[in-house]
Amino acid sequence: MKLDQNSGLLDGAEYVPSPNQDERPDPMHIDTLIIHAISLPPDCFGGCHVEELFTNCLNPDQHDYFAEIQDLRVSAHFLIKREGQLLQFVPTTMRAWHAGESCFQGCEKVNDFSIGIELEGCDTVAFEEAQYARLAAVTQSIREAYPAITLNRIVGHSDVSPGRKTDPGPSFDWPSYRKRLKT
């Protein structure tokens, strides 16, 4: 698995382009990796609702919650589904709209300098082994392409948006994930 720094695409990922992206203010400044969790409808897994959300194709008539979020324009660079399937929505060279109102180590607008990886999951259900394995492999590829992303700059959405976000949540096993990463 290798990330092409010119295209910003990761080989081995299914590319599903999202319109919810734009230019980074400084494309050379990427030094943070944000781990997220998402499930649509909340606490339900499977299906293609996350992909539909990230491509602005979510049908608001399919679920009451979808009607509430139908105007959201969000994305992430990557999504790792429960069985380990990897999708890429935004090239890493572009800014994905994943962190929203955020701040990390005194710097606001975290989307400007970060890469976002969504895991299909929620706060109350353990993540799958296949997800941890894929996440570790993707993280290694990203870190090879962006060496400024050190272990202390790999954080959860809750770390950059405290009080507003809880993901990846208490069910995410940070020690297990970090053990899989090369220092």
Image (spheres, rainbow, N blue to C red):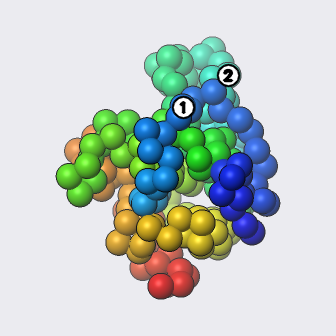
Q: Which mark is residue 22?
A: 1
Give percent across and percent down for residue 136: 59, 72
Q: Is residue 43 visible?
A: no
Horizontal and vertical percent position of residue 58: 64, 23
> Which of the labelled discs sits on residue 72, or is there none?
none
Near mark 1 (Cα within 10 A), the count class, few <14, some 14-19 or many ≥20, is: few
The image position of residue 170, as x and y in percent, is 37, 62
Which of 100/40 is in front?
100
Q: Residue placed at 53% from the left, 34% from the top?
A: 23
Left-right relation of 165 to 33? left
Residue 167, image x, y percentages: 40, 52
Q: Amino acid at mark 1?
A: Asp
Residue shown at 36% from the left, 46% from the top:
110
Query: Does 94 sit above or below residue 63?
Result: below
Label 2 sits on what residue type? Cys
Asked which secondary structure carries label 2, the reply is loop
Q: Image quadrant of residue 101?
A: top left
Depth check: 57 or 13 in front? 13
Residue at image x 42%, y 59%?
32
Q: Which mark is residue 57?
A: 2
Which quarter of the rendering shows the N terminus? bottom right
Q: Secondary structure at mark 1?
A: strand
Which of labels 1 and 2 is toward the front? 1
Left or right? Give the position of 129 relative to 156.
Answer: right
Q: How many marks?
A: 2
Between the C-alphas of marks 1 and 2, the distance is 19 Å
Disc 2 packing (10 Å; few <14; some 14–19; many ≥20): few
Q: Nearer the viewer, residue 150 or 41?
A: 150
Task: Identify the residue at image location x=49%, y=23%.
Answer: 72
